[in-house]
Image (spheres, helix red, strand yellow):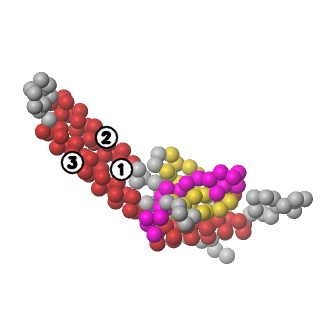
Amino acid sequence: MPDPAPVSAVPRRMRLVCAGVAVVVVAVGLFVALTLRSNSTGVIEFGAVDQVAVAGLALLLGAGVLALGRSRVDADAERIRFRNIALTHELPWDAVRAVAFDRKSAWATLRLRNDDEVSLLAIQAADREHAVRAVEGLRALLAAAEAKRPKPPPLLYPDPRD
């Protein structure tokens, strides 16, 4: 039986929203930087250094907003790699017990064999059909990995996690 197709997912709507917000933040910051002169009482005078600082802060804030949309999931027959905002993780399928997407959840999660849960911010409910296809693909990859894994010897008592 051939392996299921690899899966790649990014948060489509979140990237669009983050890009729009970043453009607004940078535009407002640059407008403030260009119109920054002095206050109405004439007590404080702003110079070119202050204008450059405000413009720089606007650019940094815009970049920070864009970073929120960097989430990504890539999975193949051996492992799943995912990035949630800043950190990238890589797990073999042997470490994963289930791929979950609860009805009220905003994003998918991986339930691990050590009873931990890891959020997959790249697969979001707002993406609807794209999220469904990504979760189904991850579940198919997990099922294929489970089928390849050797069966453990029977336990004296049943495992409560199964």
| CA gap, disc 2 and disc 1 | 10 Å
| Element on which disc 2 rests | helix
For residue 73, say whether it is visible.
no
Q: Amino acid at mark 3?
A: Ala
Residue sitting at x 31%, y 40%: 60
| Element on which disc 1 rests | helix
Question: Which mark, residue 66?
Answer: 1
Residue sitting at x 29%, y 56%: 20
Question: Which mark, residue 27?
Answer: 3
Location of residue 18 with respect to 56 vertically, above or below: below
| CA gap, disc 3 and disc 1 | 14 Å
**Of callouts 3 and 1, which one flags the residue occurring earlier in the amino acid sequence?**
3
Does 118 appear in magenta? Answer: yes
Quarter holding residue 15:
bottom left
**Of callouts 2 and 3, which one flags the residue occurring earlier in the amino acid sequence?**
3
Q: Amino acid at mark 2?
A: Leu
Residue sitting at x 40%, y 53%: 69
Camera-side residue of 108 and 140: 108
Camera-side residue of 88 and 48: 48
Q: Which residues are magenta?
A: 111-128
Rendered location of residue 39, percent (x, y) = 12, 31
Q: Are marks 2 and 3 in contact (CB under 8 Å)?
A: no
Q: Quadrant for the N terminus, please.
A: bottom right
**Residue wearing tag 2:** 60
